Image (cartoon, rainbow, N blue to C red):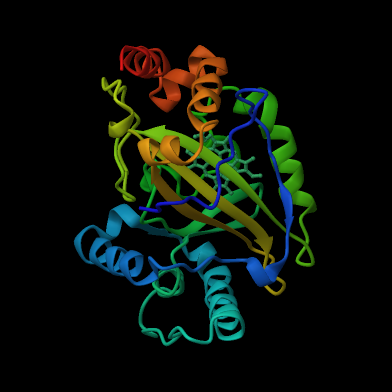
Amino acid sequence: MDPTPRYVPLDARGWRLAMGLRPLDLRNWLELDEHYERDLAEKSGLLDRCFDVVVATEPEGDAGSRELLREVQDFLRRVHPEVATRVDENEHPIVAASRLVQEDLCVLVKDDEWRLRAACVCFPSRWDLAQKIGTTLDAIHGPVPHYDEVLARPTNGFFDRLGPERAFWRLNWTLLDSAALHQPSAARVAPSGQLADWFFRVERQTLRQLPSTKAIVFTIRTYVTSAATLARSDGDFVPALLYAMESASPATQAYKGWTGVAARLRDALVAK
Ligand code: HEM
C-alpha cells in the first residue's frame, strides 16, 4: 500500500462520468515504483494459483500481444535499464509482458468492432475477466451505469481515431473495504462506517495503438492507499471524498458498493 498516493483524482465539482483523457508522453508509459518486486511476486503467485482467473486470450490477440511484449521490453531497456527483461519464450506474450511490469495489460483488436482479445489482469477492481474476453467496449462496460448514454459513443470514436503517434492516459477511482490488489469478485455493500476500514483505490490507465499490428493496448496500474492515512495527510480529502460519493447517482453508488457509506462515515467522524 502506498503511504502517499501519486494520484487523488477527486473533483471539487462532485462525481463526474467523463473520459478524462490526457496526452501521454511515452517515456512515462508505465510506472515502476518501490513495490515493483512485491507486485511482480504477487502476479507470479496468482499466475501459479489461478491462471484462468487472471489470463484470457484468443488467437486474434496473439500478434498484438507479441508486439506488446517487444514494446514493453524496449520501454524497460530505455527507461528502466536496471530491471530484467528476459522472458520465458514458451509463455503467451501477454503473460510474459505482464510479468515484467506492475501494470495489468489488455489488447484490443478491431474486426466488426474493437474487441478485447488478450489480457493479463491480476489486479481487477471487482470484475471478472473471463466474462469480458472477446466482447466489445460496449459489452465490457455493460454494468457501468450511464456508460451507454454518456461514454459509449465518445469511447468508440476515440478507439477508431487513435493512431500510433499519440497516446493517452486517464484515472479512475473508487473506495473499497479491502486493500487487496486482486479483487475479482463483484462489488458488495460493506457495512463499516470507520474510515480505517476503507481504501482509496486509483487506476492509472493508458491507451495507445501499436504501430505494426494496430492493436490497441490498454494498461491499468492500481494504487491503493488507506483512507485514514490520506485523511491525516490531507485535510481536504474527507470532505471531497464524501461529496464525490454522495453526488454520484443512486445507480452509480449501487454499482460502486457505496450506498449509505458516505453517511455512515460522516456519522462516525462527527461522533468522534
Ligand atoms: C477511453 C476509454 C475508456 C473509458 C472512458 C472507460 C471508462 C470506464 C468507466 C467510467 C468505468 C466505471 C469504473 C468505475 O466507476 O469504477 C469503467 C469500467 C470498466 N472498464 Fe473501462 N473505460 C475505457 C476503456 C476500457 C478498456 C479499453 C477496457 C478493456 C478491458 C475497459 C475495461 C473496463 C472494465 C472491465 C470495467 C469494469 C466493468 C464491470 O464492472 O464489469 N475499459 N470504464
Q: Quadrant of residue 213?
A: bottom right
Q: Nearer the viewer, residue 130 or 270?
A: 270
Ligand 1 location (quadrant): top right
Q: Nearer the viewer, residue 233 or 254?
A: 233
Give how far across and how far down residue 190 sits, in percent: 28, 24
Is 162 left or right of 185, judged from the image as shown? right
Image position of 158 with respect to 68: above or below: above
Q: Is residue 140 visible?
A: no
Quarter of the picture containing the C terminus is top left
Residue located at (59% from left, 83% from top)? 74
Give how far across and how far down residue 90 sits, in percent: 36, 82
Q: Is residue 24 visible?
A: yes
Q: Nearer the viewer, residue 241 or 73?
A: 241
Give how far across and how far down residue 36 sits, in percent: 39, 69
Task: Tell how many labels.
Answer: 0
Is 206 left or right of 128, judged from the image as shown? right
Residue located at (40% from left, 53% from top)? 2
Image position of 118 with respect to 231: above or below: below
Residue located at (26% from left, 61% from top)? 46
Q: Quadrant of residue 191?
A: top left
Residue located at (45% from left, 83% from top)? 83
Give how far across and how far down residue 57 sits, in percent: 43, 60
